[in-house]
Image: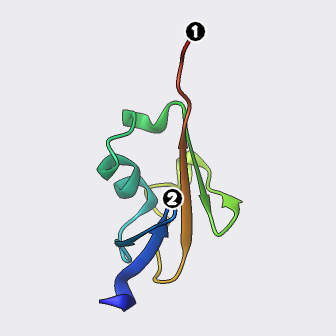
Amino acid sequence: MTDEIVTVNGEARPVAGRTVGWLVDDLGLSPGGRGVAVALDGDVVRRDDWPSVVLRAGQRVEVLSAIQGG
């Protein structure tokens, strides 16, 4: 159903109506968002706002996770 589609990291996903916080959790990223950044239509979403920002159909979301290495 195209009216539920949000593009997440370049992939179409039926997550419209869910929150940014839900999406971060669904992607299996760090609890509390430590080391994670989210941009919604090119604008960074503050971590404190993740629980209240609802995804809408047609939006583009980029979720980035810092990876430690050496």
**Residue identified by numbered label 2:** 9
Q: Position of residue 10 (x, y in %)?
A: 51, 64
Q: Is 29 left or right of 35, judged from the image as shown?
A: left
Q: Quadrant of the N terminus?
A: bottom left
- Residue pictured at 53% horizontal, 26% vertical: 67
> 9 or 58, which lies in front?
9
Tell me whether the residue at label 1 lies in contact with that at label 2, contact meaning CB atoms closer than 8 angstroms: no
**Residue identified by numbered label 1:** 70
Counting the numbered discs, the total is 2
Q: Position of residue 29 (x, y in %)?
A: 38, 39
Q: CA distance from mark 1 to mark 2?
A: 25 Å
- The quadrant holding residue 62 is bottom right
- The quadrant holding residue 43 is bottom right
Q: Is 14 left or right of 20, judged from the image as shown?
A: left
Q: Amino acid at mark 2?
A: Asn
- Residue pictured at 54% horizontal, 18% vertical: 68
Q: Is residue 12 above or below residue 45?
A: below
**Considering the numbered disc 1 on the image, is that residue within a helix, a strand or a loop?**
loop
> 5 or 48, which lies in front?
5
Q: Amino acid at mark 1?
A: Gly
- Residue pictured at 54% horizontal, 31% vertical: 35
Colour theme? rainbow
> 51 or 61, which lies in front?
61
Q: Is residue 10 above or below residue 57?
A: above
For residue 54, say whether it is visible: no
- Residue pictured at 70% horizontal, 64% vertical: 42
For residue 7, say whether it is visible: yes
Q: Is 17 left or right of 43, judged from the image as shown?
A: left
**Considering the numbered disc 2 on the image, is that residue within a helix, a strand or a loop?**
loop
Q: Position of residue 32 (x, y in %)?
A: 42, 36
Mark 1 vs 2, N-terminal side:
2
